[in-house]
Amino acid sequence: MAAIEWLDGSLAEAQAWSRAQQRPLFLYWGAVWCPPCNRVKSEIFARDEFVARSASALCYHLDGDSAGAQALAAQYQLRSYPTLVLFAPDGSEITRLPCELDGELFVAAFDTALGVHKAGSSAAAALEAALSGSRALSAAEWSLLSHYSWDTDEGKLLGDRALAPTLAALVAAASAGDHANPDAAARLHLHAQLASGTGDAAALLAVLADARLARSNLDIFNNSGLSLIKIAGRREELAAALGSVAAQWADDFWLSAPDRLMAVRLQMRMSRLLAPSHGLQDVVRERVEQALAESTDPYERHTLVNTAVSALNDAGLSAEAEQVLLAELPRSHSPYYFMLSLAASAKRRSDTAAVLDWYGQAWQTSTGPATRLQWGVSYLSSLIDLVPQDSARIEQAAQSLLADVQAAGADAHQQRNLSQLQKLAPKRASLPRALAAAL
C-alpha cells in the first residue's frame, strides 16, 4: 500500500521547499495519544485516494511533543489536536480542513481546496467576498467555506469577527440570489445553530429528510446531533428523525468502524430522548463487542475504543466500559490516555484512591514534554482537590511537575503547555513556591 511522503526536517525547511517548488504545503498538527488524530491516520491518511491526492502538495507532520512545537503552534495559531492546514507556497493559508469528515468526503474537500487555490482564491478571499458582496462566489468557494474547520480556526480566518454572526451572514449569502448554494447554506446553518445556541427545527428536519444532504453532514450530526436537538425544540419529532438516520448510518458498510459506532451511540442518545433505552443497551453492547473483535489497525482501534467507552457509558453500561479500558491497556500504543478514562470512571464511583492512582499512573507512563505537562497538571490538580490535607504527596507531585516544566524549556510557556499550566493558577496558594513561581 502506498503511503504519504512526510517531509523530514523543520517546518521552516518545509516552507522553503514549498516556495521553491511552488507546491502547497499540507500541515498535520497532532499527538500520538489523540483519538481524533488516530482516526485521521486510519480513515484519511491510510486511504489510497488521499495518498494519491497528497502528491499534489508537500506534507509535513508537526508533533505536539517535538522540540519547539508549541512555540510554532503559537506562531501559526494551532491548538486543538488535530489541526489540518493547507498553505499556499507563499505561506498564506488556503484553508483549514475538518478532521471529522470521513475519508471520501475529506478527499473531496481536499480536492476542492487545491482547486480553489489554483483558481487564485482561498478561504480568506472567499469569506471577504461573501461578507462584502463584492462578487459572487463559485460553487467550489462555497464548498470551501462550508467545509472550513471553524472549530480549529483560533481566530486565523475570523480575525476579530465573532463566529455566530459571521456564520449567520454566510448562511444568508449562500441562500440568496442566482448563485445560491443550498448544500453550503445547509451545512453553514448547522454550524451557525451550534455557534449561536439557537436551533431551527424546520431546517434540521429538512436536512434529515434528504438522505444525501444528511449523509454529507454526518460528521456534524455524529459529534453534535444531541446539542442540535436540545436547542431546536420539537424534540420528539427531531429525535425520531435523527434516530432513524443514525440507525441507517450504523449499518452503512462504507463508513469506518468508529463512525458506525458513533452512529450507534447517536441512535441510542436519540432513543433516550424519547423513552428509556433499555432495549438499546443490548444493541450497544453487541456492536461494541463486534467492532473491537474485528479491529486490528492500531490507529483505528485507538479511536474505536474511545468511542466504545463513550457509547457504553451513555447506555448506562459503565462497568462494561471500564472492562473495555482495562483490557485495552496492554495492547494500546498510548495506554496512558485510557488511564484518564479509568480515572473518570473511578470518580463516578466516588473512589478517590482509584482516581488518584489512575491519574498518577497515567502521568508516570506518559511520554513527550507536552503530554507530560498536561497529564502532570491533571494529577496535581486532582491531589489538591481530593486530598488537600496530603501535603507530602502534593509537594512530591509539584516537584516532579516542576522537573517536567524545566525539561520542556521555553516551550513550557507556549500554546497548549501554557494553557495547561494556567489551570493551576487558581490553586497557586496550595502549590510549593518554586512551582508557583514557574507558572
Image (cartoon, rainbow, N blue to C red):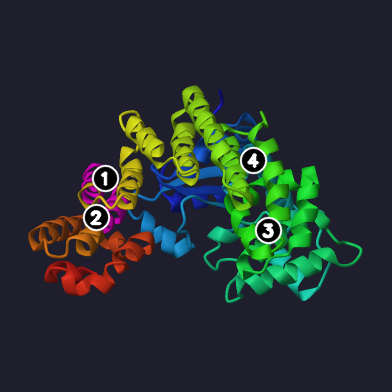
Q: Which mark, residue 338?
A: none
Name the N-terminal-most of marks 1 and 4.
4
Disc 2 to disc 4: CB gap under 8 Å: no
Q: Amino acid at mark 2?
A: Tyr
Q: Which mark, residue 362?
A: 1
Disc 1 to disc 2: CB gap under 8 Å: yes
In the picture, measured across the screen, residue 47 lies left or right of residue 384, that is right
Q: Quadrant of the N terminus?
A: top right
Whole-percent x, y for residue 263 in the image: 61, 41
Secondary structure of the residue carrying tag 1 is helix
User: Can you identify the residue that label 3 sits on?
Assistant: 235
Label 4 crowd bin: few (<14), some (14–19), many (20+), radius 10 Å: some
User: Can you identify the residue that label 2 sits on?
Assistant: 379
Residue span colored magenta: 355-378
Q: CA distance from mark 3 to mark 4?
A: 45 Å
Q: CA distance from mark 1 to mark 3?
A: 40 Å
Q: Amino acid at mark 3?
A: Arg
